[in-house]
Amino acid sequence: MPANDELKALQEKYRKIAPLLEAEYGRKTFKPHDGMDELVSCILSQSTTDANRDRGFDALKAKYPSWKSVRSAPEEELIDTIRPAGLANSKGPRIQAALAQIYDERGEYNIDFLEDMPVDDAKEWLKALPGVGPKTAAIVLCFGYGRPAFPVDTHIHRVGKRIGFLPNNISADNAHPLMEAIVPPEEYYPFHLQMIYHGRAICKARNPLCEKCPISQYCDYYVEEVLES
Ligand code: SF4
């Protein structure tokens, strides 16, 4: 975590950037999603595109009527079902192991208790499940339950480093507490989405479209790499 003065400067940078991104991409209002769906969808999303994740998830939901039936499905059958999501050989067993652990601990395939658990405890509970890291835990809490957790995916990681919110050598996993310290908790959900939209539309991985960027004046990459080149 940066020193106090440095953190205050990052929070100030956030306050300048946030209204500009909101003007560009709008503001999404939180709508709860089923927590179990969110969790399994996140496990399927690892190292693949959103479209392939959705194909795998839709196939799983179409084939199995309940989480109990997913857990008890023959492993090879489940792997075949979720194959469109990629890495099915590891994701299938991970999903079944996560479901088994949830049932063993809770006596049901339901994680809605996370809505009321202190958020740090909820993160730790989720991270103890097979295949669940800081990003998945934050997505389940933020998107499933509207809890104050800021997920750092590949777009947030890249855009956050370019803007200067995140140091260049920080991993996505380690970036979660820093983003949570910079952004006010009530803004995690809309700002997370605005950064993702920005990463897809303008701050692209290979060639960021800096000349079209509404926040370039506050961006470290632009000031240090583009203006000075
Ligand atoms: S100025 Fe360029 S690098 Fe910075 S946020 Fe905008 S598009 Fe990304």
Image (cartoon, grey):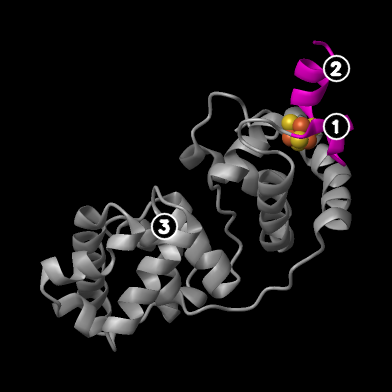
Q: Is mark 3 on a helix, strand or loop?
A: helix
Residue 227 is labelled as 2
Total numbered circles = 3
Image location (x, y in percent) of residue 44: 36, 60
User: Vertical placement of 102 versus 122: above or below?
Assistant: below
Q: Is the magenta stretch mostly helix, strand or loop?
A: helix
For marks 1 and 3, the one nearer the N-term is 3
Question: Compared with residue 25, is residue 200 higher up or lower down, i.e. above or below?
Answer: above
Residue farthest to the top? 229
Q: Which residue lies at the image location 48% right of the left edge and 80% below the top edge?
A: 34
> Local crowd at mark 2 within 10 Å, few (<14), some, or many (≥20)?
few
Nearer the observer: mark 2 or 1; the answer is 1
Sequence-first tag of 3 and 2 = 3
Q: Locate the N terminus and report the quarter of the image it occupies.
A: top right
- Left or right placement of residue 206 versus residue 73 in this view: right
Identify the residue under disc 3: 45
Is 86 positioned to the left or the right of 25 in the image? left
Q: Nearer the viewer, mark 1 or mark 3?
A: 1
User: Of the residues shown, which amino acid type is indicated by label 2?
Assistant: Leu
- Say the numbered circle drawn on residue 159: none
- Quarter holding ligand 1: top right
**Residue underneath mark 1:** 211
Q: What element carries label 2?
A: loop
Q: Does the magenta stretch include residue 97?
A: no
Measure how far apart labels 3 and 2 are at the Cα level.
36 Å
**Residue 71 placement (x, y as % from top left):** 19, 76
Q: Is the distance from the Cβ of mark 1 to the nearest ligand 1 atom less than 8 Å?
A: no
Is residue 120 at least partly visible in the picture?
no
Q: In the rendered structure, which disc, 2 or 1, sits on the residue that comes first in sequence?
A: 1
For the magenta stretch, what is the residue range? 209-229
Mark 3 belongs to which amino acid? Ser
